[in-house]
Amino acid sequence: MAMEKKVFDSEEDLAVSLAKYIADLSAHFAKNRGLFTVVLSGGCLIECLRKLVEPPYVDSIDWSIWHIFWLDERVVPKTHVDSNYKLAYDGFLSKVPIPPDNVYAIDDTLSAEGAAEEYEARLKHLVSSKVIDISSKSGFPKFDLNLLGMGPDGHVASLFPAHPLLKENEKWVTFIKDSPKPPPERITLTFPVINSSDYIALVVPGAAQADAVGVALGGGSGQNGEALLPVQRVAAEGVLTWFLDKEAASKL
Ligand SMILES: O=C1O[C@H](COP(=O)(O)O)[C@@H](O)[C@H](O)[C@H]1O
């Protein structure tokens, strides 16, 4: 796997560079695949996408090829303030002409178990219809671009430090009922799926994440060499790019 680290003077500069990175990948996949599968997380990520919904990108990107998925979701209605769908819709999806049929939200009418099973079944169907590729290396679904955030404790998606779900290596989608960060019930893609992505952007602005960035990029590990933080388990089949501002990078 190739890994790049970009550190920006400000969160504004990070957002500008992230928009160009995503627009370039969209053009690349438009040319090579005719489709662009993009996974969104919640949290700060959506705010960092704000330059994509402005000129020149809002008018120059071919939004018709985009297919949108969620990295994780909270078990709440789509209208709830904690919903990652609502966050993405309000801040991004409502501002760009992605075809509504290409937006694959996690079902908010089901239990955590039910929603995870239903999303995995939907992903399998989309693999059969060739919207999503399968990784020839891992056998798991391979998204074109996975846009990840990271919490101050180093969690990514709804995969938290020292939680047994970190080691899930069969399911594509799973659920958690004891998330240390509220709300407790969530649905999440698993590490084998995340790590089969062609491109991953780890978008981490702000001083609150500095300690975790310091451990992750400083190579900190536990007694038996195991990763201390969930974010240290992130890898991409293609390229993993860290987008940091100088506050987030202050402990490097
Ligand atoms: O709970 C969550 O947290 C992570 C990180 O959020 P951030 O606000 O620290 O960026 C987020 O990526 C995930 O999607 C979300 O459900």
Image: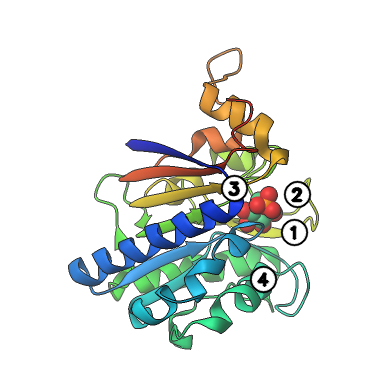
Dot 3, how many residues are within 10 Å of its Cα: few (below 14), some (14-19), or many (20+)?
A: some
Q: Name the residue under label 1.
A: 185
- Which badge, 4 or 2, is on the more N-terminal residue? 4
Q: Does the residue labelled 2 lie within 8 Å of ligand 1?
A: yes
Vertical position of residue 128 compared to residue 188: above or below: below
Q: Which of marks 3 and 4 is in front?
A: 3
Alpha carbon separation for disc pair 3 and 4: 23 Å
Residue type for callout 4:
Leu
On the image, which quarter does residue 116 sit in? bottom right
Q: Is mark 1 on a helix, strand or loop?
A: loop
On the image, which quarter does residue 28 sit in? bottom left
Q: Which of marks 4 and 1 is in front?
A: 4
Residue type for callout 2:
Ser
Is residue 168 rendered to the left or right of residue 47?
left
Q: Which mark is residue 10?
A: 3
**In this orientation, which residue lies closer to the viewer: 91 or 34?**
91
Q: Which quarter of the image is occupied by the C terminus?
A: top right
**Position in image of residue 240 (x %, y %):** 40, 43
Q: Is mark 4 on a helix, strand or loop?
A: helix
Alpha carbon separation for disc pair 3 and 2: 31 Å
**Position in image of residue 248 (x %, y %):** 63, 38
Q: Nearer the viewer, mark 3 or mark 2?
A: 3
Q: Mark 2 points at which residue?
A: 179
**In this orientation, which residue lies closer to the viewer: 55 or 174?**
55
Vertical position of residue 242 compared to residue 60: above or below: above
Q: Mark 4 points at which residue?
A: 87
Residue type for callout 3:
Ser
